[in-house]
Image (cartoon, rainbow, N blue to C red):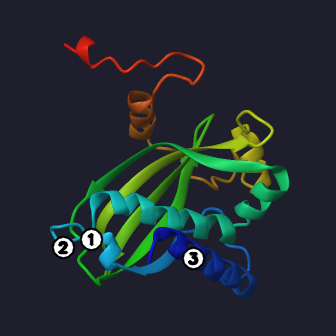
Amino acid sequence: MNVIWRTLLVMARARRRRRREGRLPATAVGRVRLRTLPTDIDVLRHMNNGRYLSLFDLGRWDLMIRTDLHRIMDERGWYPVVGSETITFRKSLNLWQRFELQSRWIGHDDRAMYLEHRAVVGGEIYATATIRARMLSRKGGTVPIEDVIDALDLQRHGGGDLPVVPEWMHEWAGHVALPSTRRPAPSDWDSIA
């Protein structure tokens, strides 16, 4: 089964859960049960490292639908894009192994929201990823983070609805950033000393 079919299935299940259970608070942990399929593994017979990030997208879809962010994006002509992501592996997920994909928004800065995804088996973390994402407008440009927070009824400086992003995440985002699309970004391997 390709990831597109899994995405459509997760979206349908998220809509059903949203209707049945109500809106998930934006700060809640979303949970999706998955299984490692033959299309997920590599020649070493465990989940391919690149597949984790593709499957973690499923957690973002579940979270966006169940928190109503997907509806808000549709109404306002917004769409999310991942700017940076990093993943750390602890244990391998093997063929047919069941795992829970846990996803949550962990905070924001003045330009982006940060998310964390975890692959969890029996309460134990097998892999974790940190995602920095921005919201863009179909009319052009970036949606101010304040507009996203307001749309989700989050308080930016009060109530502590979203935790403060740890300093290492700000440093990470700065270290892995590429130049703006308005500036050149030549690929010149020969200039590297």
Q: Earlier in the sequence, mark 3 or mark 2?
A: 3
Displayed quadrant of residue 14: bottom right
Could you tell me if the residues under marks 2 and 1 are in contact, i.e. CB atoms within 8 Å?
yes
Residue at 18%, 73% (x, y): give it. 45
Residue at image mark 1? 41
Q: Exactly how many numbered labels are in the figure?
A: 3
Q: CA distance from mark 3 to mark 2?
A: 25 Å
Residue at 23%, 77% (x, y): give it. 94
Closer mark to the observer between disc 3 and disc 2: 2
Give amino acid for label 2.
Answer: Arg
Secondary structure, mark 3, is helix
Residue at image mark 3? 10
Report the quarter where the N terminus lies: bottom left
Taking 30 as reference, is 12 left or right?
right
Residue at image mark 2? 45
Can I make out residue 103 in this image? yes
Residue at 43%, 40% (x, y): give it. 169
Seen in the picture, residue 65 relative to 174 is either above or below; the reply is below
Category of crowding for the residue at label 2, using alpha-carbon neighbours closer than 10 angstroms: few (below 14), some (14–19), many (at least 20): few
Seen in the picture, residue 161 relative to 21 is either above or below; the reply is above
